[in-house]
Image (spheres, rainbow, N blue to C red):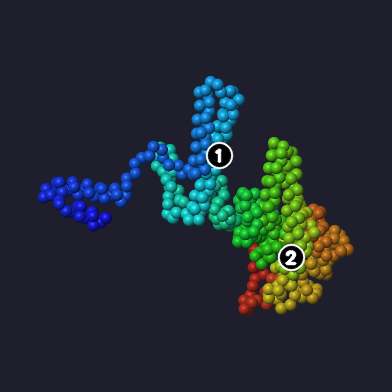
Amino acid sequence: MEAAAAFSAWSGIPEDAVLGTERMNRILRDISDVSMPRKGLSRRPATYWWNQEIADLRRSCNACRRRLMRARAKRSTSRESLRELWDALREARRSLRRAIVRSKIKLWAELVDDLDRDPPRGCRLALLIGFGGGVVVSIGSAVKYLGLTLNSRWTFRDHFRLLLPKAWGMAMALVRLTANIGGPGERRRRLYATAVMSVVLYGAPIWAQTVAGDREILRDVRRLQRQLALRIIRGYRTFSHKSEVILSGMVPFDIVANRLRRSYLRRRMIITRDGGIAPRVSSILVEERRRSVSRWRERLVDLPPGCPGAFVRGAFLGDLGIWTERAHGALTYRITQVLTGHRVFESYLHKIRRRESPICLFCRAAVDTAAHTLLFCPAWAERRSGLLEIVGVDRTFRTVVRAIVRSPEAWSVFADFCEVVMRKEEDECSRERELNPPGGALISPSYMHSSDEEP
């Protein structure tokens, strides 16, 4: 073709430059038409959903229509025959429409699947809004719809990746408002934590099942929930995660999400069946809340006996539901120390290598624990009389917990005892530091109380 084009273009060109140029343009146009034919406008634009099945159905539909028109033209055709032909035409048209819909759905699904597997990079969509300007929308692997970030695989990792920094910002703002000493009470702290978790739990009926099997999301949300639990109980990071969530009464995140999902499904079933919300829907919420606490209790029972937080778990496991729903009593800084056995007890100080032995400083008992100070140490016998009247003969920490979660009077006696005993324990620790300062530096006794006194 190249040789023929060159020969046709340059052989026999007249001397006149104008005629030569016109002839050259005509030859190049003919060559281009041969290699790339021009396509004129067809009578009807091609449809992407057309296939052989639709063509056959369309041919059959036209044939039915022709038979009906010919039968109408004949006066001798009976009404029954016309009705049969009309029914056949109607059925043919219905089949044609169904085939077109099926073809469109199939091709659209294939297009979406191709875009999901290989999305175009760097593309932008310009959406015209109103009468002027446009909004540039990026094409990506995720889209935000009704507050949820969705991707093609429905893993919801993108959703929590964007959501958790916002929730952490709210939690850190609450940290400045909820110091361990002073600040709002337990109920207000619990309200703050609930506000943060409500942001995280938005849309839980949709993603609860998927997130329950994603360890990465569960780990990240558990960290946030732990921080909120510490603010509720006025604790430190040295507490175990199990102790924090039990004392705070915060049911684990995945169990709460599943509870919301089950409540939603049951409400929707009632609305579908009865056409509206029945008065007993509120009882469904209470029932699902209790069921979630039961699932939480079963999870705690399955933990090994020596895992972190076993002391608190053993004391509260039997009364977990009553503890989370109690209406009396509020955790203070010193009550939390007694319930967890942290800070000034010699067994804890020995465990973190701040003491050479766990011996009690007051009665020289072998091990100084929270239960020993609360129930057995003779140094606090006078202060303990009111507590023993409530506890009875069974002097166990479990009995104390069972009493305080059921009786406001028992809680009041227990709280007074904790405040008095813990202050004196702190005084004794201050004297020990004063007599045996680390590195030869003298520590003032008021150093420890400057951050512990109630404002």
User: CA–CA distance between discs 2 and 1?
Assistant: 57 Å
Q: Position of residue 255 (x, y in %)?
A: 69, 55
Along the horizontal axis of the image, is 111 left or right of 193?
left
Look at 57% across and 57% down and name the residue there.
157
Rendered-image quadrant of the N terminus: bottom left
Q: Where on the picture, by quarter, is residue 400?
A: bottom right
Residue designated by label 1: 98
Q: Position of residue 249 (x, y in %)?
A: 71, 56
Along the horizontal axis of the image, is 318 left or right of 134?
right
Q: Nearer the viewer, residue 435 or 276?
A: 276
Q: Which element is circle 2 on?
A: loop
- Is any part of residue 80 visible from this angle? yes
In this rendering, the answer to whether 348 lies above or below 127 is below
Residue designated by label 2: 303
Along the horizontal axis of the image, is 73 left or right of 449?
left
For the residue carrying disc 1, how many other residues have a C-alpha within 10 Å: few (<14), some (14-19), or many (20+)?
few
* Kind of residue indicated by mark 1: Arg
Look at 75% across and 51% down and name the residue there.
290
Look at 66% across and 64% down and name the residue there.
236
* Kind of residue indicated by mark 2: Leu
Q: Which element is circle 1 on?
A: helix
* 2 and 1 marks in contact (CB < 8 Å): no
Q: Nearer the viewer, residue 250 or 95?
A: 95
In this rendering, the answer to whether 290 lies above or below 60 is below
- Which sits earlier in the primary sequence, circle 2 or circle 1? 1
Rendered-image quadrant of the C terminus: bottom right
Along the horizontal axis of the image, is 355 left or right of 400?
left
Look at 73% across and 50% down and name the residue there.
289
Q: Position of residue 198 (x, y in %)?
A: 63, 50
Q: Position of residue 362 (x, y in %)?
A: 78, 72
Q: Nearer the viewer, residue 195 or 21?
A: 21
**Furthest residue toward left:** 15
